[in-house]
Amino acid sequence: MNIKFKKSIGLSWLLLGSFFVSDGLSSPVNQTANVNGCDLMQSSGGSVNASLDILSRPAGISPEVVYFSAQQSSDPNCLDFSGGTDIEACRTGQYFGYHFDFDDPDSSVFAVTGNSKNSQISGAPRAVHTFVCEGADNSRWNDASQQCEYAVKVRVQNPTGDWDDACANVAIKPQAVEYLAAETYCISSGSDFSDCPAGVPVANRLTDSPPQNLQTDLSHSRVLYQRGSAGMYSPMCIGYGERDIRVDSYGVGDDPLIEEVVIGTAQGCSTIPSNAQVSGYDILSKNQSGHVISGWAFGNGVANLRLRNLTVGMSATLLTLHNLDLDWSAGGMFSAPSNGYVRMGDTTSNCYDNADLDCDLVPYPYGIFVSEVRSVGDVDNNGVVGHIPGVNIGCFRDCGIVNSAIIGSYAKASFEHNLRIMGAWGLVISNSHFAGDHAGTNGPKSKITLRQVRTDAVASQVVNPEDFISGNHAGDGPGWQRNSDTGSHFYPHYNFLVDNILGDTINTVTEDAGWIDLHPGHQYSSVFGSEFLLWSGADFNATQLFLGGRNITSHGTTFNGENITCRFNTRYWPQPSYQFDASTIFSDTPNGQCNGAVRSLPTPSQPGVYGDDLIFLNGFESLSL
């Protein structure tokens, strides 16, 4: 066993006083230097070289989802399922096993699956975690720096047992520390501000959502709605130029109800900007460490609310949507047509039809994180359809969402799909339940359907939406640009489904619907730990795994014993398929369909734990200077 002294990724813990991390938030540093497990990562001494990168930002405001990638890990002995040495195939479900440890023992388990939130163990090289830090009661609290500090680790292991560990630092500020009283708004329909944080100015105590106008910039503020308050609040809208806003709740009682929250608006609550307005928005940029530091509607968050609808505009950057209730299964006086809809991107294709907006100026959405969100339409026990969304969670035509995630969420009862995404790169769908009840009449729909940016169109093999640098959107790409030419769109890459539940034992709508559908064009994407449930009105002729593309795998699937296990998605209509190769699709189906009987992947042990002399389970240990 070898000790490797690696430079930790994320924050510089040996500085004194105050420093600015890559996202622009000011973070005071403890006067005592901290030495954590990132400084003493070990390996088995074999050929594996682990890597762990943060592709969002390493410091943020609670609650904040952070996106991790171990996909740059390597091994010269890589052997993919085709018998070749394609390192991307080895990294994405055909060789390595990954154990992510988020160093967050307070995070408990996912309500929908019962799995721990504190780890992800699979063949997926990408993972996300929602960090919640409310203060001194958190086990990772640093009183001197007034923040929670985490040493996130990954162990990467090959099939012969060789492994290597890597680590990254994360720091999360509580809202009460990050925002001054003057930066806080309390909203109460009954003018009850008794539980509003101390010192909030009278002018910031409102009875409805803040007015939407171009003269008001709420950047770096928090807007808190009173729990237990009566009625429904007007829409809360966040502009493309506004950043680091938290929309949350205060007090006790039921979640406050807001008609809609819209993140990404140009004026009022309109999501469609003009070229003149776009020129004033922050450019989507990274720093040299690869951390995203700016973009449209950057670094905002919405949490702990009840909503009729939730909408993200044409683009947003590093958006956390956490613990939101859009369950309208019981109807009620505030129920309305299409309520319960989570739009991860809205009017994303508008620039193609709008002479006042150049598509080349509109970035793809980057880092849209749906965390523990419930979307349920109104279908009663007799199958009578009430108010339902078109889809529960969606990002439609020309969406092109990048390095985003859906975790710990629940979706059921919609007109069409539970989840439909038009073009995703780096999408992580984890520990969520897509329960069916597709109540529409316009053909078979799916629990999960992931398509191309433009359905089945020829796209570019060289465009990489992760390839951009500070002050220059394009990199080698063009990369981030939405571009009206479909031939300049990216093909879906690096999408990973981990430990999800599909279907339900009780459905009330007679449906003929698919389960997981990856359209042709997908590359280096995999499905892990899916569980397909069986109900008495089984989806006749439907397929549980419908796989299209190249270098696609499935592992650890629990099939329901009734529906077709797996089919290739060749998609010959409306035009021939592109980027489809059945010989590079591998499933774990018991009957050999989709090249069944894949090789087992390794299951690494917990990273950062090596023995009594080198255990850093408590995160950060102090070393006096």
Image (cartoon, grey):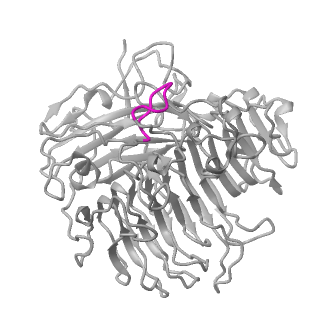
Residue shown at 14% from the left, 49% from the top? 161
Q: Which of 387/467 is in front?
A: 467
Does 428 sit left or right of 89 as displayed?
right
Instruction: Give the position of the N terminus as an image quadrant.
Output: top left
> Residue at coordinates 21% horizontally, 54% vertically from top-left?
602
**Who is closer to the viewer here, 341 or 139?**
341
Q: How many marks?
A: 0
Residue shown at 53% from the left, 33% from the top = 284
Q: Which stretch did the figure color magenta?
A: 465-476
The quarter of the displayed image where residue 579 is located: bottom left
Question: In the image, residue 380 lies at what x, y percent?
Answer: 66, 80
- Magenta stretch holds residue 245: no
Q: Is residue 5 above or below residue 264?
A: above
- x and y, in percent, of residue 216 in the image: 79, 31
The residue under the point 51% across, 58% down is: 421
Placement of the C terminus among the 4 image quadrants: top left
Q: Is residue 231 visible?
A: yes
52 relative to 22, above or below: below
Residue 37, x across and y down, in percent: 31, 31
- Image coordinates of residue 479 in percent, x first then y, are 44, 39
Residue 618 visible in the shown view: no
Q: What secondary structure do most residues of the magenta stretch adopt?
A: loop
Q: In the depicted view, which residue is nearer to us: 31 or 578?
A: 578
